Amino acid sequence: MRVYRTRDAGASWEPLTNGLPQQDAFETVVRDALTADSHDKAGIYFGTRSGKVYASNDDGDSWNAIADALPSITCVKAFVVGHSGAQA
């Protein structure tokens, strides 16, 4: 399993596999089941049709499984909760 990242508008692509299963990983991810948050080092999240959710908090450099027994996932959304850091 891998996620691909481009940093040059698609001229080249980098496979991201650190932490993702590389043996017997027969997963399907639909278009709306991958999203990113707005942190400086983006959190990236995706869900699979077999009910797994993977997350990265470092622009996709490394991944962790955060859920493993959900129903089929067809949509994932992310948002940041908290204050903006501004002081009154």
Image (cartoon, grey):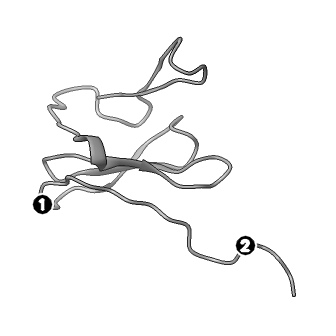
Q: Earlier in the sequence, mark 1 or mark 2?
A: 1
| Mark 1 or 2: the one toward you | 2
Q: Position of residue 11 (x, y in %)?
A: 53, 11
What crowding class fits label 2: few (fewer than 14 Cα within 10 Å), some (14-19), or many (20 or more)?
few
Q: Is residue 33 left or right of residue 4?
A: left
Furthest residue toward bottom: 88
| CB within 8 Å, label 1 to label 2 | no
Residue 21 in sight in this render: yes
- Seen at 32% across and 56% down, the residue is 76
Q: Nearer the viewer, residue 24 or 87?
A: 87
Residue to which mark 2 is pinned: 84
Which label was assigned to residue 34?
Answer: none
Q: Is residue 13 left or right of residue 32?
A: right
Residue type, mark 1 in image: Pro
Which of the image's four quarters has the N terminus? top left
In the image, residue 22 above or below residue 75: above
- Seen at 49% across and 38% down, the residue is 62
Residue type, mark 2 in image: Ser
Q: Is residue 59 left or right of residue 40?
A: left
Q: Nearer the viewer, residue 46 or 52?
A: 46
Q: Position of residue 80 (x, y in %)?
A: 56, 67
